[in-house]
Amino acid sequence: MRRRTKRKLKEFFKIFFQLLIIHAAIVAAELFLGDSGISDITSTLIAIISIPLSLVNKNLPFYTGEGVLITAIYGGLNLMIQTVIVYGVKRVFKRLKKQDSF
């Protein structure tokens, strides 16, 4: 039983860190390429990745200008919501695939 729990937790953190890297790359692109034409694309991507947090409260995008600590908390909360969604979808597809094999 413990092995299964550890495996699930390991998979959850793997998804979390993959999403973290994607978020960091998008934000870095926005910061470094903000003056070029790519800023339209990165701004759109930032708006898309902030959707889970804005579903909680429409006034809570994670990139608010309220300071580093609050921005980090909002970003972490947004990342956790996205991780739970991706992890849940992945588990549902695994179960569906397992049922189809029988």
Image (tube, grey):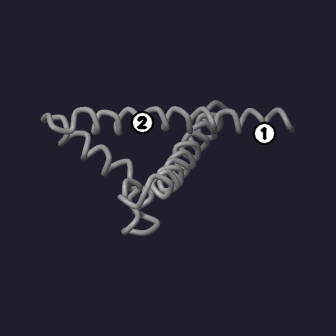
Q: Earlier in the sequence, mark 1 or mark 2?
A: 1
- Drawn side of residue 45 relative to residue 94, left or right: left
- Residue contact between numbered discs 1 and 2, judged by CB atoms under 8 Å: no
Q: Nearer the viewer, residue 53 or 69?
A: 69
How many numbered marks are there?
2
- Spatial CA distance of label 1 from label 2 is 28 Å
Secondary structure under tag 2 reads helix
Residue found 74% across the figure and 32% down from its top: 7
Q: How far from the left and from the top, in percent, is residue 73?
A: 52, 55
Q: Which mark is residue 18?
A: none
Q: Quadrant of residue 26?
A: top left
Residue, far right: 1
Q: How far from the left and from the top, in percent, is residue 68?
A: 45, 52
Q: Nearer the viewer, residue 101 or 79?
A: 79
Residue found 25% across the figure and 46% down from its top: 44
Q: Is residue 94 above or below residue 46?
A: above
Q: Quadrant of residue 6?
A: top right
Residue type, label 1: Thr
- Drawn side of residue 101 relative to residue 73, left or right: right
Pointer 1 local density, CA inside 10 Å: few below 14, some 14–19, many at least 20: few
Q: How far from the left and from the top, in percent, is residue 72?
A: 49, 51
Secondary structure under tag 1 reads helix
The N terminus sits in image quarter: top right
Residue type, label 2: Ala
Q: Is residue 99 above or below residue 71?
A: above
Q: Is residue 15 above or below residue 52?
A: above
Residue found 63% across the figure and 40% down from its top: 95
Q: Label 1: which residue? A: 5
Q: Which mark is residue 24?
A: 2
The C terminus sits in image quarter: top right
- Of the two numbered discs 1 and 2 in the rendering, the one whose residue sits closer to the viewer: 2
Residue found 54% across the figure and 45% down from its top: 83
